[in-house]
Amino acid sequence: MMTDYSEFHDELRSVAGDLLAKDRAVDWPVLVDAGWVGLEVPEQFGGAGATFAETAVICEEIGRAASANSYLGSAVLAVGTLKALQPSDTRDQLLTDQASGAVRLAVAIESDFVPDAEGADRILIITDDGVAVCAPSVTAQPVLDDTRRLATVTAIDSAEVLRFEGDPAAAMRRLRDRAAVAVACDSLGISEAMLDATVGYAKVREQFGRPIGSFQAVKHACADMLVTVSVARQLVGAAVHAIADDRPDADVAAAMAKSYACGSAVDIAGKAMQLHGGIGYTWESGIHVYLKRAALNRSLFGSPAAHRKHIAQRYL
């Protein structure tokens, strides 16, 4: 049962928003100093001992700022993978180093598009037998979104294969669900940012002697965006709690959140570009940054169609 930490989450959201507003590109040392990289690391290894619910708050704010950083691959996925492993000296040391920021890790769930592998000290490669800890051979993969770094990874110098705690297939499924929900949180932040920007612009941009927000067509479009964001927020919130509680149906909640939040973020960013008029299509407006990020999020860790297919399996 999740405890209500809404007040703490609001404070964490405010602090994260202030930090990310200073610069779109956030380096690894900044994430370390903020304490985010060890947020879910148990206290005995120097971490904060928090849960995925707190990590989700950071992911949402990163999406809201369209921040370019390595938090997804080197913190969210890395800590989730390490905590899924059997205790060992290697695992415990990696958790300690993760909490302190001494090493930067990346996780290869799919070897062709690995988030934040460039510059990582070690790669955790998911295999059928467990997790191989390797020195990375990395080839950058150019993608539409300039705020993310993806790469193809080839394992070299495999130091050790660490075993999952419990059923390996179930552990790998939980890691994929965790990754999908983290990206859904990011997309929710994108949608919220685009809604806020569009409403703010509609209040001040005038046409025919009055703000464009007074026109019915613009009102309805903004209302539709708000409804879509509200639905996405409910689905993402349910998925975050399911992952944090390790519920048996977490895969279904994750699929619902990922398919809806990531698909709708593309639509909302596109609508925001339209409602900003001619300026929305300019490079200076910045809306293209959110649209590109939303488009990549839609494809990462399962497309909406793939996740909807997974949900449909329950009825076959």
Image: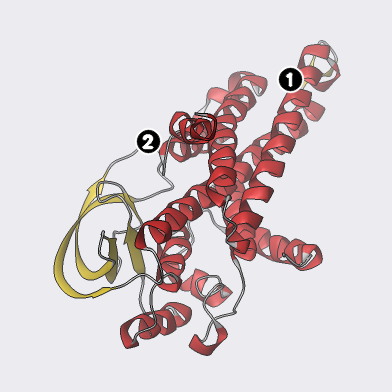
Please, what is the three-letter code of the amino acid marked with disc 1? Ala
Q: CA distance from mark 2 to mark 1?
A: 27 Å
| Element type at mark 1 | helix
Query: How far across and how far down the image is residue 182, in percent?
Result: 53, 52
Q: Is residue 22 visible?
A: no
Locate the N terminus and report the quarter of the image it occupies: bottom right
**Front-most of 316 and 155?**
316
Question: Is residue 268 visible in this depiction of the protein?
Answer: yes
Q: Which residue is at 79% across, 62% downward? A: 6
Q: Are marks 2 and 1 in contact (CB under 8 Å)?
A: no
Toward the top, the furthest residue is 208
Which secondary structure, mark 2?
loop
From the viewer's perspective, is residue 165 above or below residue 260? below
Q: Amino acid at mark 2?
A: Leu
Circle 2 sits on which residue? 144
In the shown orientation, is residue 74 left or right of residue 120?
right
Q: Residue at x 42, y 36 (%)?
A: 299
For marks 2 and 1 on the same chain, the one whose residue lies earlier in the sequence? 2
